[in-house]
Image: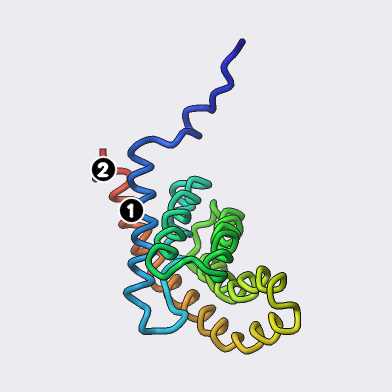
Amino acid sequence: MRSRSKPAGDRLTARELCILALMGALIFASKFALASIPNVNLNSLLIILCAVFFGWKTLYAVGVYVLLEGLIFGFSLWWCSYLYAWPAVTAFVMLFRKNDSPLVWAAVAGLCGLCFGPLMYILYLTVIGWEAAAAMWIAGIPYDLVHCAGNFGLTLLLYRPLYKVFSHFLTRALP
């Protein structure tokens, strides 16, 4: 019987596994570092950069990030929402993977920030009902707007320099 192995390009190498685990930790650390500014973080930007360089393998970094969130802050309903919300953000980012415009990436990151709140409340619908989930979402709109603006601004400002850093380390500095 013939083996049905994946093509070599689809396999996760040990090098990629280490880099993606570090990316997940970097996403967590950067969010922690910016925690004093509510809803402003580098998560979407780092996921964008990871997707540009690693494609769907970015989900490994997202998995590490989500696991670290649970281990540090506890596993509860909000964490269960992370199990689908961050992969959904990754899937959305993958639609634009071939793009190289900081402005387009800033718009994508901003939209991710705007939609993250509603994504989180999908699970809440099943637990607390649509009225309470809708009230929570409406109350969170100002935070979603800050998240959108923060993602847009940080991505517009940092996409190109971080792309260069990623490119340097992933293609030249590391064997």
Residue at the outermost top position: 1
Q: Is residue 159 left or right of residue 55?
A: left
Name the quadrant containing residue 140: bottom right
Spot occupied by residue 20 in the image (x, y as percentages of width and height): 39, 49
Residue situated in front as seen by the camera: 79 or 137: 79
Q: Where's residue 106, x and y in %?
A: 51, 70
Direction right: furthest residue: 130
Mark whose residue sits in front, 2 or 1: 1
Image quadrant containing the N terminus: top right
Residue at 54% across / 85% down in the picture?
Answer: 143
User: At 42% across and 65% down in the image, what residue appears?
Assistant: 69
SS at badge 1: helix
Considering depth in this image, is 117 or 166 the residue closer to the camera?
Answer: 117
How many numbered marks appear?
2
**Does 44 appear above or below 6?**
below
Q: At which x and y percent is residue 29?
A: 33, 66
Above or below — where is 161 with respect to 140? above
Residue 2 as seen in the image, left or right of residue 159: right
Q: Quadrant of residue 130?
A: bottom right
Q: Which residue is mark 2?
A: 174
Label 2 or label 1, whichever comes before in sequence order = 1
Q: What residue appears at the point 63 percent right and 70 percent down from the top-left corner? A: 119
In the picture, the quarter occupied by the C terminus is top left
> Would you place residue 71 above or below residue 116 in this image?
above
What amino acid is at disc 1?
Leu
Q: Which residue is mark 1?
A: 22
Tell me the residue at 51%/79% (across/down): 147
Quadrant location of residue 158?
A: bottom left
